[in-house]
Amino acid sequence: MAEITGSDSPPEAGDGMAIWVDADACPKAIREILFRAAARVGVPMTLVANHALQVPASSLIRMLQVQHGFDVADDLIAHRVQAGDLVITADIPLAAEVIEKGGGVISPRGEEFTRNNIRQRLNMRDFMDTMRSSATDVGGGPPPLGPRDKQAFANALDRYLARYARK
């Protein structure tokens, strides 16, 4: 397992769900929404990244810094996530692993990945990978996060927490 800095003990919480954040590419605006939501509903949250991030002083929020390397943060999240937990990530293979373990997944743009749509998303990701490797111009990455994306994320998170978080 990867070397971890930060408290390795879970944040204080009762039984119930936890939120895991694939924080390497998670925009600051989305992290801020998550900080407020975790405090509002009392759900423990762990950010996992290969670089240090500032988090509010809270017994509910912790930051785990893993060593640099391909998928190190993803692997840690996939290993530790439990059924009923929520993961925030745009990484489709990680989302598929989380769903397989019974967890929920929301992307930073507010898309909820489910058993019903993850296979299609994996197929599209693999297709785009193939296109990129064949030197076909398929364009750049996603556009910058805008106000609509932030609102879509906040709405998806609120809906998810209303369904699954224990208050």
Image (tube, rainbow, N blue to C red):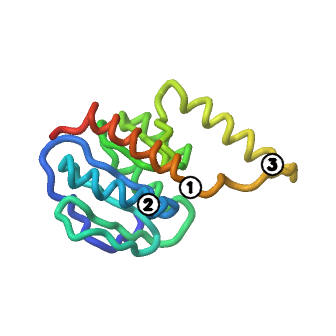
Tell me the distance, in whole angstroms, between the alpha carbons under discs 2 and 1. Answer: 9 Å
User: Residue 71 in the image: x percent, y percent?
Assistant: 53, 59
For mark 2, does the 10 Å Cα neighbourhood hold few (<14), some (14 to 19), or many (20 or more) residues?
Answer: few
Q: Which residue is mark 3?
A: 138
Q: What is the quadrant of residue 86 in the picture?
A: top left
Tell me the distance, in whole angstroms, between the alpha carbons under discs 1 and 3. Answer: 20 Å
Q: Earlier in the sequence, mark 3 or mark 2?
A: 2
Camera-nearest residue between 13 and 134: 13
Does the CB distance between marks 1 and 3 fall below 8 Å? no
Does the CB distance between marks 3 and 2 fall below 8 Å? no
Looking at the picture, does residue 2 appear above or below residue 157? below
Seen in the image, is 141 located left or right of residue 105?
right
**Which is closer to the viewer, label 3 or label 2?**
2
Tag 2 secondary structure: helix
Amino acid of disc 2: Ala
The number of discs equals 3
Tag 3 secondary structure: loop
Tag 1 secondary structure: loop
User: Residue extending furthest top?
Assistant: 116
Does the CB distance between marks 2 and 1 fall below 8 Å? yes
Residue 103 disc label: none
Amino acid of disc 1: Leu
Residue 145 disc label: 1
